[in-house]
Image (cartoon, rainbow, N blue to C red):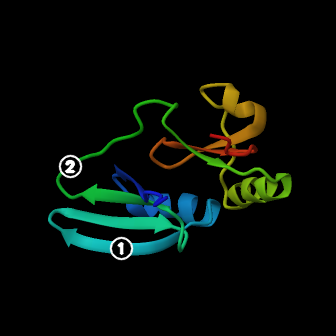
Amino acid sequence: MDVPKLRVARPTDDIAALLPFYCDGLGLRVLYRFESHGKFDGIMLGQEGAPYHFEFTQAREHQAGRAPTQDNLLVFYISKRNAWQAAVDRMKGAGFDPVPAFNPYWDREGATFEDADGYRVVIQRAAWTV
């Protein structure tokens, strides 16, 4: 089966402010960067060969603002305890402390972190079973 590739795209008011969270904390790499694409600048972050990446765009004449709620989440499932702990430790080592999840379900087996725009990422210690 040909698995679709996923791009999660969202606006921001400050691309540079997001880089420490997603690169240093989550361990993603800059895959592509563009400037002056119309009135947009942008960056794509991910892992080489992964079936997903994240695109953040900044419009010069538009303000994106912060996340509309604390329950706007990206969730990474990591089933092995040592790999999960390493991911949490990398976030903390990059200066990002866990925040209480809006939905307490995510606190039982995961750790939630908030980026500079108020969007949240959960590092969930569980297998992807769907």
Quarter of the C terminus within the rendering: top right
Q: Position of residue 18 (x, y in %)?
A: 47, 58
User: Who is closer to the viewer here, 130 or 117?
Assistant: 130
Task: Give the image quarter of residue 5.
Answer: bottom left
Left or right of 34 on screen, residue 84: right
User: Who is closer to the viewer here, 57 or 105?
Assistant: 105
Q: Position of residue 107 (x, y in %)?
A: 72, 32
Whether the residues at callouts 2 and 1 have beta carbons within 8 Å, the answer is: no
User: Who is closer to the viewer here, 73 or 119?
Assistant: 73
Q: Amino acid at mark 1?
A: Arg
Q: Secondary structure at mark 2?
A: loop
Label 2, label 1: how far apart the Cα atoms are: 19 Å
Mark 1, residue position: 33
Q: Position of residue 23 (x, y in %)?
A: 56, 66
Q: Amino acid at mark 2?
A: His
Left or right of 37 on screen, residue 95: right
Q: Residue at x 39, y 40 (%)?
A: 66
Instruction: Please identify, in this view, whether the residue under mark 2 or under mark 1 is nearer the observer.
Output: 1
Left or right of 38 on screen, residue 126: right
Q: Residue at x 35, y 73 (%)?
A: 33
Task: Give the image quarter of residue 75.
Answer: top right
Give the crowd class for mark 1: few <14, some 14-19, many >=20 residues within 10 Å.
few
Residue 107 drawn above or below residue 34: above
User: Who is closer to the viewer here, 17 or 42?
Assistant: 42
Instruction: Return the residue found at the far right.
Output: 82
Q: Residue at x 67, y 56 (%)?
A: 95
Left or right of 42 on screen, residue 48: right
Residue 102 drawn above or below residue 27: above
Mark 2, residue position: 62
